[in-house]
Image (cartoon, rainbow, N blue to C red):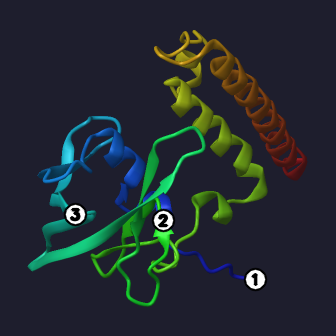
Amino acid sequence: MFRETKATVQSLRCIDSRQMTKQGIFLEGNQGSYYWSDAETKEINASINYRYQHQVLTLSYSSGEKSFNYSIRVDQSACNYGGVRLWFICPSPQCMKRVAKLYMGSSKVFACRHCNKLNYAIQQMAEKDKARYHMYKMRDKLGWSYNHVTFLKRITKPLNMHHKTFNAIVAKHDEYERQFLVNFQAFIDSLDSAQN
């Protein structure tokens, strides 16, 4: 039976309230440009202008021949160990959910994952491909290469990462790699048996 696929969160540009907080965007009166860049080349491929005032983030940008200018409310919640965490309020009138990320869907307006009817790439994967996906996610966290030959050099712990965190991620990676190799061997075996 044909399985309908949806757009995934990984396929769309998003704004993340946690990243924006770290970048100092939510400082009263702050304005500037927010950029997206290619993961490998680091070349900027898109940008939007923003202004933050009175817990409202105003975005302005063009997409195609259409210009957009609208506001997104920013809410906050107390953290367990002090301080606050900032959230977007989805600007879609029928939603208004408090979320960390908003995605630019087909309407070219940022809205939450539910309003854009998105799911995660892993939800559309075959079971046999999930171990490789998780293995690569661990390599991303560690700054390790996807290239297995280069990866065998085992690059050291990333700067500013605690040893305990590093060891836990490496252990997860090694388990996903083991699962991936088992699945890959099973695939090779199935090819061999099909040819005989």
- Circle 2: residue type: Val
Q: In this view, does 5 lie above or below 157?
A: below
Mark 3 or mark 1: whose residue is earlier in sequence = 1
- Circle 3: residue type: His
Q: Nearer the viewer, mark 3 or mark 2?
A: 3
Q: Are marks 2 and 1 in contact (CB under 8 Å)?
A: no
Answer with left or right where residue 133 lies relative to residue 106: right
Relative to the observer, which residue lies in front, 140 or 159?
Answer: 159
Disc 3: which residue: 54
Q: Report how far apart the C-alphas of labels 2 and 1 lie in the structure.
A: 34 Å
Measuring from the top left, give residue 89's x and y in whole percent: 40, 71
Q: Residue at x 52, y 33 (%)?
A: 140
Disc 1: which residue: 1
Answer with left or right where residue 43 lies relative to residue 118: left
Q: Is residue 121 above or below residue 113?
A: above
Disc 2: which residue: 99
Q: Which residue is drawn at 67% across and 63% down?
A: 123
Measuring from the top left, give residue 136's x and y in whole percent: 59, 36
Q: Residue at x 30, y 82 (%)?
A: 107
Q: Which of marks 3 and 1 is in front?
A: 3
Q: Quadrant of the N terminus?
A: bottom right
Relative to the observer, which residue lies in front, 21 or 157?
Answer: 21
Mark 3 or mark 2: whose residue is earlier in sequence = 3
Measuring from the top left, give residue 41's x and y in whole percent: 27, 35
